[in-house]
Amino acid sequence: MQSKTVQDPLQQITQQVQAFAAKQQFKQASQLIRSATEGADVPVLHRAHQLAMYVQDAESALEYLNKALEEIPDHAVLIADKLRVLVQLRRRSEALKLAKSAVKSVQAGPQFLHHIARIYQQLEQPKLALKILDGLAKEHPENVEVRYEQASQQFFLNKMAQAEKNFDWIIKATEGKLPNAYHLRSQLRKQTPDNNHVAELETRLEKSESADAPIWFALAKELEDLGFYDKSFEALQKANELKRATVQYNEETELAAIDSLINVAKDFDYSAKPSKSKVTPIFIVGMPRTGTTLVERMLAAHSDVVSAGEFQDFPWLIASAINEIELASGGKLSRDEALKQVDFEALGQRYLSQLKDVTGNAQYVVDKLPFNYLYIGFIKKALPQAKFINLQRDPLDACYAIFKTMFYQVYSFSYDQRELGHYYAKYQEVMALWHKLFKKDILTVNYEDLVTETQKQAKALIKYCGLDWQDSVLEFHTQDTASTTASSAQVRQPVYQSSVGKVQHVEQHLNTLREALSGK
C-alpha cells in the first residue's frame, strides 16, 4: 500500500525512529511516529502501523489501523493486519469476532481466507480453521500448504483417517520434500506389522539430508510401535543429532537464568491480599510428557471446568512487566530487581481478564502450560486463589519420553541426553524450592499412580480443586474437544499403562542421560 501524497511524512522520520529503536528508546520513537500521522491518509496510517510494530507499540499500531478502517471498512489487507495485531495483543475474543465477520463481509480471494484460517489456528479454533481449509482444499486440491494445514487440523480434531490420507497425498505430491508430513503421519496411530511405513521411510532416508530430522523421528516411532527397540533408538539418536543442530540453545545461559530465578524466589515477599475474584485458576505444571495433558482432559471432562489449554499469558505478562520497569529505570535496574517491583495484584487481574477472553464466565479454569512450574510462587502472589497440580514421573522414563518427541519451537533442551538430564535436574531443584515454600498449596500427582489407580487419583484431583465428583471425569477420552499438544493421539484413548517403564527397553543406550540426571 503506497501513499499517493507528494511527500510521505513517515519517510522523513524513519531513520530517526530506527535510531531510537536501536537505543531501545521506544517511547520517543512512538511519539515521533504519532506526530507525523496527524490528519494522515490511509496509506500513511498503514505505514504508521508498520513502524509502530517495529518499535514494539502494538497498541498504537492498532489505533492507526482502526483509523484507516474507518475510511475503508472492508479492506482485506487492513483487516488482515489488524487481526495479526489483535493476536499479538492477546485480544482473542476481539480477533475471533473480527475474523468471523470478515469471512462474511470481505470480498477477497483464497489468500485472504487462508490468512483467516491461520488466525483461527493461532486462536486455537481448529473447527473454524478446518471449515475454511476444507473449502480451500476443495477449490484448490493441488495446494500443498492448504492440504498440510488441513491435515494438521484433522489431527487435532481426531479425524485421523482423513489426516493420514492427506499426509499420504502430500508426501507423494512433494516427492518426500516435506519432512514434517512424515512425522505427523507417524503420530496418527500405532503402527502394526501389516500397516506401517517403515520400508517407505527407510527408502526415503537412503538419501537423507540435514533437514530430515522429522523423518528420522517418524522412523523411530514406527519401529518402536513394532517392538524393534534397538533399531528405533538408533534412528532416534540420528533424529536428535540432526534436530539439535538446528536449534539455538545455550545450556549455560538457560540454567544460569533458572539459578537466578531460584535465588530471587528464596527470599521473595509472597504476601498478597485475598482475591475478590470468583474464578479459580488451576495450573497444571511439570515437565512435558509426564501426564499433564491427561490430567487436563480429566478435569475438563467435569461440567464446572473449562480448559484454556497451554495458555502462555502468565509468562508473557510477567516478562512484559519486568521489561517495562527495566526500561523506565533507564537500565539502572537488573531483571531481578525489576521483578521485585512488579505490581502482582494488577498482573493477576490482567491475567484473569485475558483468561476470560478464552474461557468466558467459567469459575474453574485449567491453565496447562507445563513451564509455569518456574513461576509458582509469583503466580500465587498474583492469584492467591490459584491451585497447582504438579505431575511427576520416573525421571528416566520421563526423559526418554521427551527425547523421543519432536517438539515444535519449544523445549530446545530436549535433543541432547546430557542437556536434557541437566535441565530435568534443574526442574527438580525448582520444584523442591516451591514445595518447601508452599507444600500445602501444591498437589503432586505421580504419573505411574495416575495410570494404575486412575479412579483414586482422579477423585483426589477433584477434591483438591474443590469440586464435586462426576463420573464423566473418567470418560475424558470421549470428549470431542480439540487437543493440540504432543499427546493429541493418546488422550483419545482410555487410560493405558504401556508407557510405564518403557525405558527398560533402551536403558543401555541412556548412560549419558543417567549421568546427567545424577549431576555429572
Image (cartoon, rainbow, N blue to C red):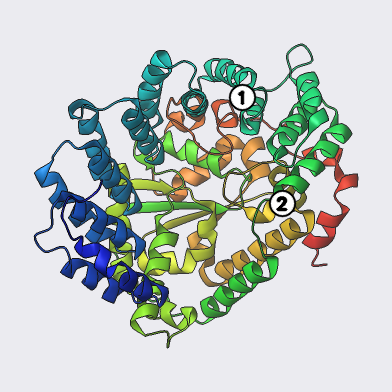
Residue 59 location (% of width, % of height) = 25, 60
Quarter holding residue 76: top left
Residue 281 location (% of width, % of height) = 38, 53
Residue that lies at the very extreme toward the bottom in this rendered image: 332
Going from N to C along the chain, the mark reached first, 2 or 1, is 1
Residue at (48%, 62%) from the top-left corner? 441
Along the viewing direction, whichever of 227 and 57 lies nearer the viewer: 57
Left or right: 307 in relation to 175: left
Left or right: 253 in relation to 364: right
Q: Amino acid at mark 2?
A: Arg
Left or right: 115 in relation to 49: right
- The residue where tag 2 is placed is 244
- The residue where tag 1 is placed is 188
Residue at (33%, 81%) from the top-left corner? 328
Q: Amino acid at mark 1?
A: Leu
Residue 131 location (% of width, % of height) = 36, 22
Along the viewing direction, whichever of 515 and 87 lies nearer the viewer: 87
Residue at (88%, 46%) from the top-left corner? 509
Check the image and report above or below for 286 versus 426. Answer: above
Image quarter of the C terminus = bottom right
Residue that lies at the very extreme toward the front in this rendered image: 6
C-alpha separation, residue under disc 2 versus residue under disc 1: 24 Å
Quarter holding residue 113: top left
Is label 1 in a helix, a strand or a loop? loop
Residues packed near mark 1 inside 10 Å, few (<14), some (14 to 19) or many (20 plus): some
